[in-house]
Amino acid sequence: MSEHIVSVRIYITIFLVLLVGTALTVWAAFVDFPYGLNTVIAMTIAVTKATFVVLYFMHVRYSARLIWVIVGSALFWMAILFAFTFSDYLTRGVLSTGS
Amino acid sequence: MRPIESFELPSPSKVNYLIAVYGLKSWLLTKDHKRIALLYLGSITFFFFVGGIYALMIRLELLTPQGDFLASTTYNKVFTQHGIIMVFFFLIPSIPATLGNFLIPMMIGAKDLAFPRINLLSWYIYLLGGIVTIYALLAGGVDTGWTFYTPFSTTFSNSYVVATGLGIFINGFSSILTGLNFIVTIHTMRAPGMTWFRMPLFIWSHYATSLIMILGTPVIAITVLLVAFERVAGVGIFNPKLGGDPILFQHMFWFYSHPAVYIMVLPGMGVISELIANFSRKNIFGYSFVAFSSLAIAVFGFLVWGHHMFVTPQSVYAGMIFSFLSFAVAIPSAIKVFNWTATLYKSSISYDTPMLYALGFIGLFTIGGMTGLFLAALAVDVHVSDTYFVVAHFHYIMVGGTLMAYLGGLHYWWPKITGRLYPEGWGRFSALVIFVGFNLTFLPQFVAGYLGMPRRYHAYPPEFQVFNVLSTAGASILGFGMLIPAIYFVWSMRYGRHAEANPWHLPGLEWRTQSPPPTENFETTPIVTWDAYEFAPPEETEVVGTLRGEYDRA
Amino acid sequence: MIESHAATPEIHGHPALQHHFENMEQQREAGTLGMWIFLVTEIMFFGGMFLAYTLYRTLYPEAFASASNHLDITLGAVNTGVLILSSFTMAMAVYFTQTGKSRPQVLCLILTLILGLTFLGIKAVEYHQKYTDRLIPGKLIPGAEFTTDPHAVHLLEGATLKQVEMFYYIYFAMTGMHALHMIIGAGLLLYLIIFSLKGRFDPEYHSPVEVIGLYWHFVDIVWIFLFPLLYLLGRHLEHH
């Protein structure tokens, strides 16, 4: 698997995108969005920024499929940790134990 | 000629990895995976004896219903330390760090693991973790149970929780580095022609084990670190008085510790696959099913941790999900048992010591696994949780399973590792003694637990005494049985008969190089065109019979 | 799918080729794969703390918002910019190594290190502010226990001081662990700088630069999540 060299232009573009994202998330933090959307917006921006770092700065866009599987697995496993733990916390008191 | 025989056996040379270089430094600074495996073998055996001494103390105390041998606070420390040493310093590293380290490169035709220096580092980290833990034990011990439940461990316990936690934290890195090394090695260093489905099942098991090590160990690391912070800082996320939730600790703890039990048993299953196929001279039945079942266990094992928390305030709804998934995770294990049994059917079994251990494993693991299913049922678990039923269940898997597999594997590969033959007669004898001793120790505990005897108590109502006396008697037999291999293995290194390259006459790649192997494993890199368990059809086999004739009578 | 490699006669190889690898390609792949797997462990490690954060934020939303609003958003935002810039310079360092331009390569590594140290410096300033405000939780600093003054932090309706302390415990645990990783990263950068000056890396062998770059980017990503979760969560509730 030969090495792919990412161009300087792409690096600069991603860098600027990340800075814009940071400014955007700071701005959005002060706006009172309805329906608790503030968190959703902040996390969406963070995930987008992280995705750009992973794909371009960390070269995953140009890497073998195995690397994609590895990154995906890590995220999936964190999701398991969160999902199953919260399946407990969010359902306490939902089913009666009769007591 | 079978394809594997086209890969020629080397002419025996005088130089092997044991004598290639001399001196303490050549061992302590080695990068050779085989030497590192032996370093681990020594240290793991040491910790096994430490854990064993604690076991002895437990069984001595439990001979009588009264708490007369140890004070209750001391007893708490004894069972805690028995668990911590056995789980973290013996069972988790045992097969991967000794047999895995030694065999994985050889089985895939490589010269070493991907990162030899990291391999050595993992041993030193293991030692450091061990030293910190031993310090904690000697300074006064820890009494929280190996499960470190909060808020007792964070607030009320007056024992060396932080030091022990630190020892476990450090040890975790050893596990992580080993798993990392194995995964990279298996992906990138297979010999030409060694496709995934030509690899021995031992490799598949260790790959699955390594996945668990990578994904699970970091969570116990952060959990144990947070417990330590909480003790030191007096504020925390696990103490209800400070606004925290003790159940969060249990979620985080068991997220690792349940998959940890698969770290402990999967390598054993890999060994058993090797032993069953090779000692029945037959290709393993359902190779891909067994291979994929290892991966399935690794994945599903992460989805069931809440079954350790059925009797906590964890929601009933979550309990139901965990219960259902716990039943599901038994399926891949059962698939393995069925496939091993099918392999034995109409095969040519030789009842050598390794095979005796393998057969014992199948029976005992089945019992352990089935009792696990009983525990997975919510209604049953409510009654037998925190009783000796649970203790018996996990000892059937850990000792009846993993320890048997470890001993079987050690015997099987002993000629390859040391170039010496162990005394076969004594091998079979001790395997039988261990089997009898083990069952006598733990079978009564199922009954005692079912009848209500709680675990982690140094005193108990007199009606349970008969079970405890049987159990302690069994433990003595088990202990005696395990001393025998300890003695003859050491004896064989000096006085055992020299082994040829392939004393068992088997097709595996590790048997195609001399015993003991040269440092670089193979003189030329093999080009693999054969499957893992290619046995000659019966017509072509010369009758080898059992190997009794090849061994010294001790 | 990374294939296994055909054996090549190892008469001579690159001086950095290790004996158990067949060729530089295999060695590079193994190194990259190894670092990615290590990063998986780091993701799970920080994941445990993110779990605790998520749980307690759900349980004590007002307290978390109050405590978060007391953090210095300017310093936090500047630090975010500093880290993003350092990720850029790190990526450029890898680029220059791949293209054999050693002077700019070393320069970029040094810039990355300086930016990393800047981040740590700003963090130290923030931590000191917490110290003087007596917001370091529990008995972590004997003699400077957590404040009992209910006006130390502007409390929103429903928030208690104990819950605010919980926020700061998680804040220090997460940013402290992050800072520790930055310190380690700084050490790794120093190693890279020294060996780059010695001319150790070239287009054929620069795996350490790449692999440490991956580590550095990962540490940046953790901060990309920490910043909004810790600094920004309650700003929209501020009524100034």
Image (tube, rainbow, N blue to C red):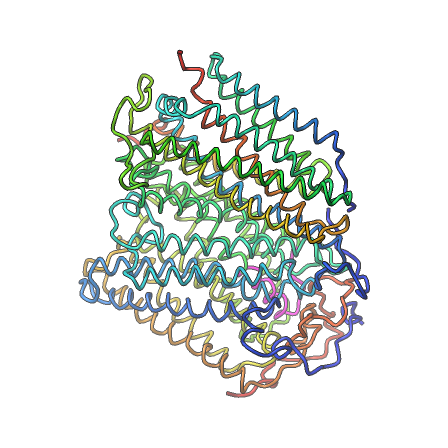
For image coordinates 42% across by 62% down, the residue present is: B130
Kindly tell me whether residue B481 is visible in this rendering.
Answer: yes
- Quick check: B212 above or below A47? below
Q: Is residue B479 left or right of residue C112?
A: left
Q: In which quarter of the image is the N terminus of chain B?
A: bottom right
In the image, is residue B281 part of the stretch drawn in magenta? yes
Query: In the image shown, does C39 or A57 lie closer to the viewer?
Result: A57
Kindly tell me whether residue A83 is visible in this rendering.
Answer: no
State the image quarter where residue B441 is shown: bottom left
Q: In this view, does B433 lie to the left or right of C205?
A: left
Magenta span covers which residues?
B268-287
* Picture coordinates of residue A43, whole percent (x, y): 53, 25
Q: Is residue B11 left or right of residue C142?
A: right
* Picture coordinates of residue A35, whole percent (x, y): 47, 14
State the image quarter where residue B526 is shown: bottom right
Classified by dominant secondary structure, the portion drawn in magenta counts as helix
State the image quarter where residue A69 is shown: top right
For image coordinates 67% across by 42% down, the residue present is: A67
Q: Is residue A10 left or right of residue A79?
A: right
- Quick check: B256 above or below B70? above
